[in-house]
Image (cartoon, grey):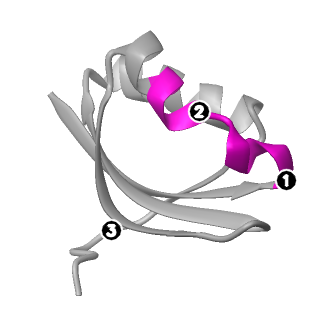
Amino acid sequence: MAKRIVKLTFVGEAIKKPLTFRMAKKFDVMPNIRRARVTDKIGEIVLELDGKEKDLEKGIKYLIKSGVVVEPIGGDVIE
C-alpha cells in the first residue's frame, strides 16, 4: 500500500460535489481527513490517501480533471 498526504482546494461548484467520495469509491482509495475548512466560496481539505500507487495516481488525476487543485504536502499536519 502506498500513502500520500495532499491538500485539496475546491472552488465554485466543486465545493458542492462529493468528489472526494467519488474518487474513493471509483479508484479504491481510502481517504483520511486530517484537516478541513469549508466556506461558501472555498473548501480546503488535507487528506492522507492510502491505496495502490496506480489507484492513487488515477484518483488524483480524477480530482484535478474535476477542477480540484491538488498539492502534495509532507510532514505531520495535525497541530
What whole-number distance in Å separates the C-alpha atoms at marks 1 and 2?
A: 13 Å
What residue is at 50 percent from the left and 36 percent from the top?
20
Q: Is residue 33 above or below residue 21?
A: below
From the image, tell me which residue sits under label 3.
Answer: 74
What whole-number distance in Å separates the C-alpha atoms at marks 1 and 3?
A: 27 Å
Q: What is the crowding at mark 3: few (fewer than 14 residues within 10 Å), some, or many (at least 20)? A: few
What residue is at 51 percent from the left and 22 percent from the top?
22
- Any magenta on residue 21? yes
Q: Is residue 78 above or below residue 41?
A: below
**The quarter of the displayed image where residue 3 is located:** top left
Mark 3 vs mark 2: in front: 2
From the image, tell me which residue sits under label 2.
Answer: 19
- Which secondary structure lies at badge 3? loop
Disc 2 marks which amino acid? Leu
- Any magenta on residue 42? no
Residue 37 placement (x, y as % from top left): 52, 72
Disc 3 marks which amino acid? Gly
What residue is at 67 percent from the left and 71 percent from the top?
39
